[in-house]
Image (cartoon, rainbow, N blue to C red):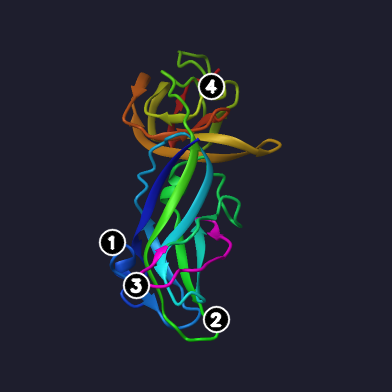
Amino acid sequence: MAEQTYYFNARGDVVWTDPDNIVDNNLTTWGYATANGDPQVLTGNTCPADDLGTITKVELRLFGKGDGDDKIVITPVFTGGDGDPHEVVPVVDPGDWTDYVDITGDTNHPDWSLWSHIQDLDCKLTPAKTGKANTVYCSKVEIRVTYTWVPPVAEIDIGAEPIDRISATAAFTTFVDKNNPANASGILHSIKIWAATNITGLRVGTFYLTNGNTLKCRDSELVGDVEAGFHTLSELSIAVVEGDFIGSYFTAGGIEYV
C-alpha cells in the first residue's frame, strides 16, 4: 500500500477568529474559537485529482492545541452531504498533530473510485468545550489517502470498434455500449468514433451498474461538434474503472453502432 497526503488550503465564511491561518500551510499560525458549537468550514484542498491508483482508505487529522480537555470535532463534507463527526483532542501548548480519524465509510461517503472525490472533499471544524470556556486552536488540517498503485496499461479497451456500420444511434438519447466493458482502470485521454453524420454537442462518458440494470454515469466530458467519418478525439480526461461501459449523448447526428 502507498500513501499520499494533502491539506486544506481554502475556507468558507469567517466563523473562527483568523481562519486563514488554518489554510496557509504554516504550523506556527493559528485559527481559534471560543464559542461552543460554531463550525468553521474548509472548502478546498491540494489534491490535483491525478489518478494514482485504487483508493482504500481516507483519513483526516489536524495540528492543534488546547488545555488538554477541550476537543475539536472534524466532520467531512462530501458531495452527497456531511459525513460523521469525529472528536479529536488537541494537546496543550505548543500543539501537535492529533491521531488520524478514518472517514472512508462515513455517512454520505462516495465510492472513492475517482481521485476527484478527494479533490472535492471539504470539512467542518467545531469546538467542543468540556466545562471550562477555554480556546481551541488549529493551524492545519491534513488528508491522508491510502491506495494501491495500479500499473498503467498501454491502451484501455472499452466499447465497440469504430467502423462503418449499417445503423446509428439517435440524437437526444444517452446510448451506453454494454458489449465491451473496460479492461482496466485509469483515465481516457482519447477515444475513437465513426460519426454516421455530422454530430452536434457530443458528450462522452463512462457508466457503471449500481443494481440490476440501473446505470450511473461515473465521469463525462463535453467533446462538442464532430464531422462525419472516423475520428480520434484527443486531449480528454474521462475517469474509467475496470468493468465500466462507455456511452454518448448528442443533440444532432449519429454514431455508427450496429
Looking at the rendered structure, the kind of residue marked 2 is: Thr
SS at circle 2: loop
Of callouts 3 and 1, the N-terminal one: 1
Q: How far apart are marks 3 and 4 (CA)?
A: 48 Å
Kind of residue sitting beneath label 1: Asn
Of callouts 1 and 2, the N-terminal one: 1
- Residue 160 visible within the image: yes
The single residue placed furthest to the bottom in the displayed view is 132
Label 2 to label 4: alpha-carbon separation: 54 Å
Front position among marks 2 and 4: 2
Q: In this view, does 70 lie above or below 224?
A: below
The answer to which of marks 3 and 4 sits earlier in the sequence is: 3
Q: Distance between the residues labelled 1 and 2?
A: 28 Å
The residue positioned 46% from the left and 13% from the top of the image is 163
Residue found 60% across the figure and 51% down from its top: 105
The mark found on residue 26 in the picture is 1
Q: Does the magenta stretch include residue 93?
A: yes
> Mark 4 and mark 3 in contact (Cβ < 8 Å)?
no
Residue 253 spot, x, y in % from top left: 43, 29
Please give the range of residues in magenta: 79-96
Residues marked 3 and 2 touching at CB (< 8 Å): no
Between 257 and 235, which is closer to the camera in this rendering?
235
For label 1, the crowd category at 10 Å Cα-Cα, with few meaning under 14, some 14 to 19 and many 20 or more, is few
Q: Mark 4 points at which residue?
A: 183
Measure how far apart labels 4 and 1 are at the Cα level: 44 Å
Residue 205's tag is none
Q: Which of 28 and 128 is in front in this view?
A: 28
Amino acid at pointer 4: Asn
The residue beneath circle 2 is 130
